[in-house]
Amino acid sequence: MLQELSWKVGGQQGEGIDSTGKTFATSLNRMGYYIYSYRHFSSRIKGGHTNDKVRVSTKQKHSSADQLDILVAFDQETIDLNAHELRIGGVVIGDAKFNPVLPENTASDVLLFAIPFTKIAEQNGAAIMKNMVALGATAFVMGLSPDFCTPVLQSLFGRKSQKIVEQNQAAVMAGYDAMKAQNVAFPDFALASPTPDEHLLMIGNDAIAFGALAAGVRVMPAYPITPASDVMEYLIKKLPKVGGVVVQTEDEIAALNMTIGASYAGARTLTATSGPGFSLMMEALGLAGMTEQPVVIVDTQRGGPSTGLPTKHEQSDMYQAMFGTHGEIQKVVLTPATAKECFYAAVEAFNYAEVYQCPVIIMTDLALSLASQSVEKFAHDQVKIDRGLLATQEQLAQMEPGQLFKRFERTKNGVSPRVFPGQKGGIHHVTGVEHNEVGRPDEGTSNHVQMMKKRLNKFEGVELPNSTTYEGDQNPDILLVGVGSSIGPISEAATRLREQGARVGHAHVHVISPFPVASLQAYMDGAKQVIVFESNATGQLYHLMRFFGLNHSEFSSHLKFDGTPFLPKEIEAHVKGSMIAWQR
C-alpha cells in the first residue's frame, strides 16, 4: 500500500474546481490523512485554466509532490498542461464530453479513461454535479468507499436540503460505478491506513486570522487584495462574535492609518495586504514608527512588480519590508513557514508590537497563504498575552496638574511607558514630526539625535526567540537556507540527500528583522558550502545575509521566479549539481 498519493483536478475557472479539490482534501483529512493542497488559478473571476493539486500522505508534508498519480480533467487543456507531471503508470480520468487524448510526451504506461462526467451528472439531477461524479471515479481508483466524502457533503449541503445531499451522494455513487464498469486492473493506488489523530485543515491566512483572535484582536481595517483577502473574510465572520469589527476602508492608506488610530485608542488591531497595497502603506508605516505605536500588518507576497501576477507565488517583498519606509525606523518582520507557525506568529506579533512599541509585519508568501495544510490542534494554553510597558496608576498619580506625561521618555532600552486615552495623568502630545519626551514638536539637532537613538536602539543585541530553526547533520558538507513556505521542499530534499549519504543541514529563517545574525553565522561557520533557496529574481534573502555581515567562502543562491513554488526534486537536483561542482 502507498504511504502517499498525489491527485490533481483541473478545468476552467468557474467550473467548481476549487470545491472539488476542497471536498476531496477535507474528506481525506477527516479520515486521518495529512493533506497539502496547492491551487493554481488565474487572476480573473471566470475562465482560464485552474487546478488543485492535493498530496495525501500518512505523514506530515509541507510541499506539493514531485509527480502526479491521478489527474482528473474537465477539459483537454488540463491534460495538455499537466500530463507531464504524471508518473509511469499514472491515471488520467477525463470527461468523455471532450474526447480526451494524451499528449505525446506523457510518461509510459499512463492509463486514460473517458468517463461521461457531465452526462452522468445530468442524469442524477444537474450538470453542475459532474465534480461529484469525478470524486466517485477517483474513489474507485483509490480503493476508497464511495461514501468517503458523505460527511463533508452533509456539512456543505445539509443546511440547504437533505435532497441536495442525496443527489450529490447519488452522483458520487454513479461515478464510482462508471469507473468500476471499465473492468480494468488498476495499479495499486490504495493508501496505507491513516493515523488516528484529528487534524485541522486550513490555509495560512485563516491560521493568522485565528491566531489574531486568540491574541485578542478586536479591530481590523483593511482593503481587499489577493492573496490577503481571506484574513479579512475570516475575521468578518468571527470578530462580531467577540465584540470586534472589520472595516473595509477606501484604500490601503486609510486602512493602516485607521489601524494606528485604533491601536492608539487601546485596541489590539491589524490590517492585511499584499505587495501593491503594502507599498501604499509606507508613509503610514513611518508614522507608526515615529509615534512608537504598536501595529500589526500582514503582507502576503505575490508576483510583482506592479500588479504583476496577483495569483502566483513569489518572495520578493523582503527589501520593501526591511527598507521601504522613508527615514529610519525599527520594525519586527516575522516570516512563518507553515500554517501552524502562522497561528503562533500572529500571537507573537501582537506581543512584540506592544513590547517594543513598533510596527510588526507578518510576511507570508502565496503558497503559505493559500495552500491548505493539515495542522495539529493548537495549544491554546501556550497563548500568552503581553501588553508591554504600561504606565501604572502609581506613576500617573504622581503627575502634577497641567504636567504632560512623558510618553516618549528616553529610557535605557528605548521603550517608554504607554498610556491609553482617558487615563488621568496621561495627557501628552502625538505628532508625526520629530518631538521631545512629551510629544511636542522639537527640531533641535540634539533632540533629534537622542530620539533617533532611542527608537533605533530597541533591538540592540536582540535576537528574537526561534528566529531560525535547524535540522540535519552537524558541520555539514552543504547547508541549505530558506525562508517562508520553502521549508517543505527544502526539508524533503535534504532528507533525501542524507538518505543517499550526503551530509546536509537545513537552516530556516523565521524572522528577518531583527536579523538573526548570530545563529545563522554559527550554522554557516560549520558548513563547507552554503546555498540559499528563494522565490525571487534578485536573491533578496541572500543579499540581506550579506548586508548584515554574514559570509562564507562557498556562498551562493538559487532562485526561482516563474510564479510556482519549489518542488523537492528541483532542490535535490540543484544541490547534487552544486556538490559535484564544488568537489571538483
Image: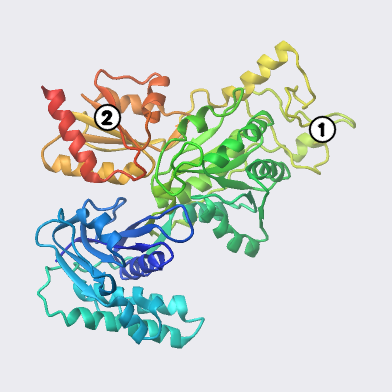
Of the numbered discs in the image, which one, if any, rests on residue 128? Answer: none
Q: Nearer the viewer, residue 363 or 428?
A: 363
In what element is the residue under mark 1? loop
The x, y position of residue 518, in whole percent, is 38, 25
- Marks 2/1: CA–CA distance: 57 Å
Name the image quarter holding the C terminus. Answer: top left
Q: Find residue 565 and report its image quarter.
A: top left
Q: Which image quadrant is residue 376 in?
A: bottom left
Q: 422 or 191, which lies in front? A: 191
Task: State how many labels appear.
Answer: 2
Which quadrant is home to the N terminus?
bottom left
Other-residue count near label 1 (Cα within 10 Å), few / some / many at <14 / 14–19 / ≥20:
few
In the picture of the structure, the residue carrying the numbered disc 1 is 398
Kindly state the secondary structure of the residue where label 2 is placed: strand
Residue, disc 2:
531
**Amino acid type for the residue under numbered disc 2:** Ile
Where does residue 417 sit, x and y in percent of width and height?
69, 33
